[in-house]
Amino acid sequence: MNLARLLQLASPALPVGAYTYSEGIEWAVEAGTVKDEATALVWIGDQLEWNLGRYEAPMLASMMAADEATLAELDAQYLASRETAELRAETLQMSHSLRKLIDDLREGGVPPGLTFPAVWSSLAAKWDIAPADALTAWLWSWTENQTMAALKAVPLGQAAGQRILLEIGGRIPAIVERALALDEESYSNFAPGFAIACARHETQYSRLFRS
């Protein structure tokens, strides 16, 4: 495993703007669904289990193994799965930022892609990162970003954030194992509460985040 490159991809310092998005958790705070450490843990854990673990993670693994034509198909499928304008704008903006970084780093040979997972997975494959390690990094990075959003929006203390990360981090290996074994017919991002939160965030009066 190329550990240094894996850490680079998972780092909050990766300049793609992930910190500006909450993916609905800001609205969940506004609605009172997320109001403390316990409810933040439930919200983040449920999204990891039912949305990312059953759709984004296996999709990412498929993208890593795909040829350019298949990658384009998966890329289109992922873009079509974004339920709201904010989620669509998020993946397009982060993809654009990562593509610009790849150009700045002079890392050639990364196939084109519109969505962030397509470009990220292509770079992970180019850097010879094992799929299980890539999925672990992807899920950890998302969990860390969601936890930081909760810290700012609820707000929560730093120790609470670390407890959430400790608990959720312990679940990631099993989610990765299941994602790698999931066949394409079983992919599912059915999470209506998440979709509603993201849609309502678009008209939320006071916002810190872009989604």
Image (cartoon, rainbow, N blue to C red):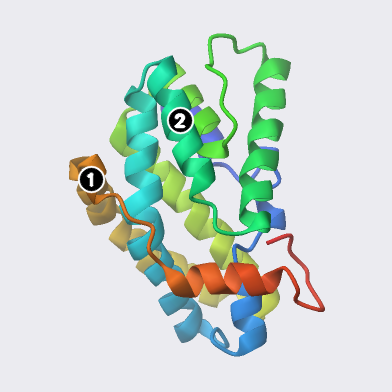
Residue behind mark 2: 121
- Residue 69 picture location, percent across and down: 42, 18
User: Residue at label 1?
Assistant: 185
Helix, strand or loop status at disc 2: helix
Tell me if label 2 and label 1 are in contact, CB under 8 Å: no
- Badge 2 or badge 1: first in the primary sequence: 2
Q: Nearer the viewer, residue 6 or 182?
A: 182
Q: Residue furthest right?
A: 206
Q: Which image quarter holds the C terminus?
A: bottom right
Q: Which mark is residue 25?
A: none
**Residue found 59% across the figure and 79% down from its top:** 28
Q: Is residue 111 left or right of residue 55?
A: right
Quadrant assignment, res 68: top left
Q: Nearer the viewer, mark 2 or mark 1?
A: 1
Q: Amino acid at mark 1?
A: Glu
The answer, for residue 163, to whether it is visible in the render is no
